[in-house]
Image (cartoon, rainbow, N blue to C red):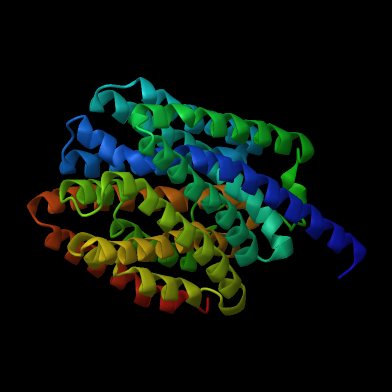
């Protein structure tokens, strides 16, 4: 490796680390909130159908916005402007939940938080993809996801501490303003130090846009497989609702259980990221196989079994947030990376919305229906992933 490449790789790692710190404190904020929103909505009078529909709607709006955000990122090159606006909306909506007293108002803020994340994600992931070219797609995205999930562990732990000292849900939301402000300060620092992240990946000859034909068939097959996984993946809000309604997990331990899942997420992101750089897309099928049976354990088991099921849920989330993003960077042309992430996330979010909404309805009928739906859809994705592993 030449001196120029070594220097470029070092700058790339520093950039990935700095954005990782941003994600760490951002996740402390909104994952801390997500660890108690299911229970909070229950206390405000929401039903299982409402929680499932809300979880799906939030993801749908957020992921649909990524389609527009990704397109605008490629058209304008305003990576930082789009990313900054998204993070401000994403993070400041969380402490405002402390001011709510009705589930309808909480719903607006929860969806607003997802909208902010949807706005900033394609631009941020495009910037990360340029940096990971130098250090390995799997390693780069896996490392970023691991830092992200450290925050996702700390957030629920902080909220658990608040509940332990009888602070209540609203106090938990309010205290999350602190990590939100730290994340925004770090983001502004990254913007100052790396004003043009596109330079981290060597420029290739531009391609001529030809509609969606700019993406290979592998991209669309991959999107189909991921859509099956997303549709069959229950949101933690519905899982938390189940734990409290059936009294399987003590109220104080529910956010702690979410922290365990996020810890598993972090380790699995590192492991699958490392494996992806060696085995390629076959790693995707392996991760889907491991996580596909979380639903029976979560929705049928007692406390210890539910812990195991939640850990498997974390394994799947780690893969979805690391190697699934790495694969897009390998499949999509560099000139249309933002658009590719936008299309991918919009499809993922649509599938998540439809699946979440239906699973909320199925849960109110019988958890067995939810379990069957979840397992079948995730297993359906595996042969498709095997089909594209060598492409």
* Location of residue 366 by image quarter: bottom left
Q: Is residue 169 left or right of residue 202?
A: left
* Location of residue 288 by image quarter: bottom left
Position of the N terminus by quadrant: bottom right
The residue sitting at the left extreme is 365
Residue 191 x/y as whole percent: 71, 35
Work out whether residue 340 or residue 26 is closer to the camera in this orientation and state it.
Answer: 26
Q: Is residue 380 above or below residue 11?
A: below
Work out whether residue 126 or residue 358 is closer to the camera in this orientation and state it.
Answer: 358
The residue sitting at the right extreme is 3
Q: Is residue 224 above or below residue 151?
A: below
Residue 181 x/y as whole percent: 59, 29
Residue 362 x/y as whole percent: 14, 53
State the residue at coordinates (44%, 65%).
Answer: 222
State the residue at coordinates (29%, 47%).
Answer: 353
Work out whether residue 99 or residue 201 is closer to the camera in this orientation and state it.
Answer: 99
State the residue at coordinates (23%, 51%).
Answer: 243
State the residue at coordinates (28%, 60%).
Answer: 232
Residue 60 x/y as whole percent: 34, 43
Q: Is residue 216 visible?
A: no
Q: Is residue 111 above or below residue 210?
A: above
Q: Is residue 139 visible?
A: yes
Work out whether residue 151 or residue 12 is closer to the camera in this orientation and state it.
Answer: 151
* Location of residue 81 by image quarter: top right
Q: Is residue 301 left or right of residue 314?
A: left
The residue sitting at the front extreme is 165
Q: Is residue 156 above or below residue 232?
A: above
Q: Is residue 55 left or right of residue 43?
A: right
How many marks on residues? 0
């Amino acid at each position: 490796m030449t001196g120029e490449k070594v220097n470029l790789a070092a700058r790339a790692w520093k950039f990935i680390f700095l954005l990782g710190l941003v994600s760490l404190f951002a996740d402390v904020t909104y994952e801390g909130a997500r660890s108690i929103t299911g229970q909070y909505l229950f206390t405000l009078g929401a039903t299982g159908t409402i929680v499932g529909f809300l979880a799906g709607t939030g993801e749908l709006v957020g992921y649909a916005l990524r389609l527009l955000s990704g397109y605008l990122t490629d058209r304008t090159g305003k990576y930082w402007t789009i990313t900054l606006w998204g993070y401000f909306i994403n993070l400041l909506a969380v402490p405002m939940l402390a001011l709510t007293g009705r589930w309808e108002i909480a719903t607006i803020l929860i969806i607003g938080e997802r909208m902010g994340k949807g706005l900033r994600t394609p631009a941020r992931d495009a910037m990360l993809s340029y940096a990971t070219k130098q250090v390995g797609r799997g390693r780069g995205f896996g490392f970023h996801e691991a830092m992200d999930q450290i925050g996702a562990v700390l957030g629920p732990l902080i909220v658990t501490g608040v509940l332990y000292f009888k602070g209540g849900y609203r106090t938990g939301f309010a205290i999350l303003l602190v990590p939100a402000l730290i994340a925004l300060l770090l983001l502004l620092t990254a913007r100052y130090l790396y004003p043009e992240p596109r330079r981290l990946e060597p420029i290739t000859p531009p391609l001529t846009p030809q509609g969606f034909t700019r993406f290979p068939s592998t991209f669309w097959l991959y999107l189909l497989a991921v859509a099956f996984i997303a549709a069959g993946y229950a949101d933690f809000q519905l899982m938390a609702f189940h734990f409290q309604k059936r009294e399987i997990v003590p109220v104080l331990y529910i956010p702690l259980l979410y922290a365990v899942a996020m810890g598993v997420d972090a380790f699995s992101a590192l492991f699958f990221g490392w494996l992806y750089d060696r085995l390629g897309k076959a790693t995707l099928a392996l991760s889907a196989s491991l996580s596909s049976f979380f639903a029976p354990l979560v929705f049928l088991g007692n406390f210890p079994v539910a812990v195991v099921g939640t850990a498997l849920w974390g394994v799947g989330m780690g893969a979805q947030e690391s190697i699934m993003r790495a694969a897009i960077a390998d499949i999509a042309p560099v000139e249309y990376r933002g658009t590719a992430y936008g299309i991918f996330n919009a499809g993922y979010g649509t599938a998540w919305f439809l699946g979440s909404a239906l699973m909320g309805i199925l849960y109110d009928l019988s958890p067995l229906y939810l379990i069957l739906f979840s397992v079948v859809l995730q297993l359906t994705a595996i042969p498709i992933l095997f089909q594209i592993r060598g492409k």
